[in-house]
Amino acid sequence: MKQTINDEKLQTLITTCFKQSMSIEETFFSTESKKIARACWAMAQRYHRAGRLLAFGNELWVADIQHVASVSVRPVSVNKRPLPAWALTNEDPPNGLLKHQSTHNVVTSFAHQLHILGRSQDIALGFSPDGNCPNVTRAMEQAQRMGMLTLGLTGGTGGHIRRTRPDFCFVVPTQDPIIVQDIHETLYHILWEMVHVFFEHDGLM
């Protein structure tokens, strides 16, 4: 027999999910505000040295890394300077949508691209829903060896990426990948906006 849910239960479910999402977001940004400011300053310094942003991630985050690169290179806000950025993609499989596959090509894809394309003054921005994506972890380690500024955006407890000790690791404390992604999206827009704040103050850089 097909089960249905009444309007009251549906409203309660939606309200509970919304409150949970908002609570996690408010706690995250309240806790991480000072670290976010330090990360933006470090990014601005790298850009000032002709550095570039190299972003990478899997699954739902593929669209986000492309958006990060796009909004950096072609800012939608008037009077914002373009910032050089690339979105790295997985070479195998072609669509780049994977998470914990362990083939050699997949695990080393991002790291290999950083080795070829990256420079010491660049910024490595890695996304992972739980911090345990092998290819993102390997890339973060490669970026560290090259002297790049490393930022890890993860969820859960931060996983392996947190243990690699990137320069800045932002961990959204939930196992829900949708909430993690939603907060990551807000975060990288704040990072982008605040980097421009530093550039807009004469003599600061």
Image (cartoon, rainbow, N blue to C red):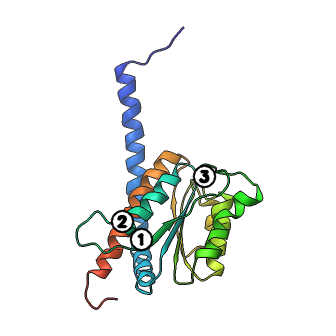
Out of 111 and 24, give the one closest to the viewer.
111
Precedes in sequence: disc 2 or disc 1: 1
| Farthest residue, direction bottom | 203
Residue 121 location, x and y as percent?
A: 52, 83
For the residues marked 2 and 3, what is the alpha-carbon distance in whole angstroms? 26 Å
Q: Residue 128 carries which label?
A: none
Question: Residue at coordinates 71% horizontally, 51% vertically from top-left?
Answer: 101
Query: Mark 1 falls on what kind of element?
Result: helix
Q: Is residue 154 left or right of residue 83?
A: right
Residue on which the image places disc 3: 96
Q: Which comes sooner in the sequence, label 1 or label 3?
A: 1
* Three-letter amino acid code at the position of disc 2: Ile
> Can you name the residue that lies furthest to the front here?
94
Identify whether 20 is placed above or below 56: above
> Mark 1 packing: few (<14 Cα in 10 Å), some, or many (20+)?
many
Position of 156 relative to 169 (above/below): above
Q: Residue beneath label 2, please?
A: 190
Mark 1–mark 3 Cα distance, whole angstroms, equals: 29 Å
Q: Are the residues at dot 2 and dot 3 in contact (C-beta closer than 8 Å)? A: no
Is residue 24 something one can see in this rendering?
yes
- Tag 3's secondary structure? loop
The residue tagged 1 is 36
What residue is at 42 percent from the left and 39 percent from the top? Answer: 17
Q: Distance between the Cα atoms at labels 2 and 1?
A: 8 Å
First in sequence, mark 2 or 3: give its number.
3
Q: Dots 2 and 1: beta carbons under 8 Å? A: yes
Amino acid marked by disc 1: Ile
Question: Where's residue 74, x and y in %?
Answer: 35, 66
